Amino acid sequence: MIVAEQKPIEEIKGFLTGHKRILLLGCGTCVTVCLAGGERQVATLAPILRMSANVEVIENTIERQCDAEFFDAIKEQAASCDAILSMACGVGVQMAASIFPDKPVYPALNTMFCGTNDGAGQWSENCLACGDCKLGVFGGICPVTKCSKSLLNGPCGGSIDGKCEVDPENIDCGWQLIYDRLKALGKLDVLTENQKPRDFSKTHDGGPRRLSREDIAQI
Amino acid sequence: MVEYRYKSDSNLEQVLSRGQFAVTAELGPPKSADLDLIKSKVELLKDWVDAVNITDNQTAIVRVSSLAVGKLILDMGLEPVVQMTCRDRNRLAMQSDILGAYLLGIRNVLCLTGDHQSFGDHPTAKHVFDLDSVQLIEMVKNMRDKGVFASGGEIKNSKKAEIKPPRVFIGAAANPFADPFEFRVIRLAKKVNAGIDFIQTQCVYDMERFERWMQQVRDKGLHEKCKILAGVTPLKSIGMAKYMRDHVAGVVLPDYYLRRITEAQDPKTEGVNICVEQIRRLKQIEGVAGVHIMAIEWEQKVPEIVQKAELRNR
């Protein structure tokens, strides 16, 4: 899922200066699961803004802000407000902005990463969406994401006791994880092969990416 | 392309191919446009070593460019080993710098991954890591020996022009003290396969672990495929010894040395003595072709160490 967290309240209040009535719009998908921008977080943030930002707040949550069709149900409500504060990820915020071209749309969250829930209140990054998945080579652990330097021929000299020198308290060395897993699978020989440079044209470095599938378009 | 006796025009390559025990040192460029500081460090090292590494924004702190300082010290009569990290440049910039370095007379390039920017003075910077060190080595090797860029295109200015490759001696680093230990030799093998001519190791204190690592190196025959220079760093004080032990990732400092420095009447002299003992022991290890003395902000001790360790038979 896409993992996000709420922006500092002062930054959110800064967006609302000059607005009288806003739609605080939650999203029922990833940000609901990671407890950042779902119905419950809308219900928590709304009274805070009413009290401290001197603004009328209308609350609503739609199933997915990354899908245009779910906005139909809130079009009238949005029309009655002079701005939208979206509690979706950056994808949802931009979708809202494209659907309401004459309405200011602000983000209430910082979108952080594609990741997993690792226990109560813990999330971690697992995929950088590089467009050229190498998990099949590295035993199901991604060096591009799990190594702080995204090395394909790691580990570097900063791997100590299974930890990454960048933050030994909190970051595991991705290459130790890969090494241990391939050892357990009896596939350590994979690591003796020199991995070629990455093709960054498949990432955002090649420009904003699009996907067109004719097989779907023809249906 | 023309056939040459040596792979490069490097003096360090010739010293190592003659089988002489090579001595390299390290010169960290200043954090300001201070030419005098560079000159004074060159004066300290000049007649005592075969070549000097010029670090590339080490510990991710902005300093004078390694390429520029390499050219400066070359003009002052000292052979540079220009360090190049993958942190700050992509493959275009690195190839361009390698061609430029060669034209400036630089003949040794050390290919490194680079310290993470979070350690330095610009922790909010974007890192590059377009290539990793293994891929960088292979790129430089292909430039030199095949006359091609990373793109596969030939290194020539026009279709009809001849290939003019950068003939540099290619180095890399190895850390026998990082983890996973069993993977350290595999990683060196990858660098050998990529095309290194020599390596310099992280500073060695734990001699027992280093010897175990060298055994693995010899078992794979890697010492015959690249020259291995063992790194040493003289301990300047108790504080520095503790810092090296506790805060430098990938350095293992046995308590024995800390105790010697702590109990010594003059820790500085003891630090030099330990370093000299280590070099003497390293010289005895089969496959160690030289020593890389990283006297961190203590370059003035290099001549004394070289003399006491009887390295000055060049």
Image: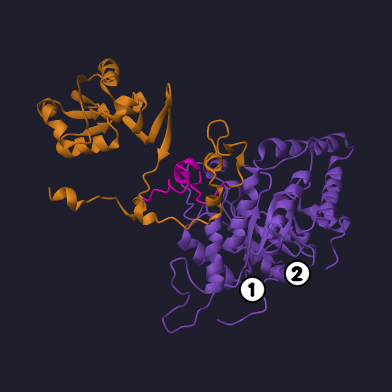
Percent coordinates x, y for residue B146 in the rendering: 53, 73
Q: Which mark is on residue A60? A: none
Residue B259 sits in quarter: top right
A139 or A1, which is in the foreground? Answer: A139
Which residue: 74% across, 35% down? B242
> In the figure, is residue B187 to the left or right of B87?
right
| Colour pattern of the rendering | by chain
Q: Is residue B68 above or below residue A41?
A: below
N-term-proximal mark, 2 vs 1: 1
Q: Is residue B99 above or below residue A48?
A: below
Chain under numbered label 1: B
What segment is highlighted magenta in the picture? A132-155
Instruction: Give the quarter of the figure containing the N terminus of chain A.
Output: top left
> In the figure, is residue B84 to the left or right of B176?
left
Percent coordinates x, y for residue A81 in the rendering: 15, 26
What residue does disc 2 label? B15
Q: Residue furthest front?
A: A186
A166 or A178, which is in the foreground? Answer: A178
Residue B200 sits in quarter: bottom right
Q: Colour of chain A?
A: orange
The purple one among the chains is: B
Helix, strand or loop at label 2? It is helix
Amino acid on which the number 2 mark rests in the picture: Val
> In the figure, is residue B50 to the left or right of A67?
right
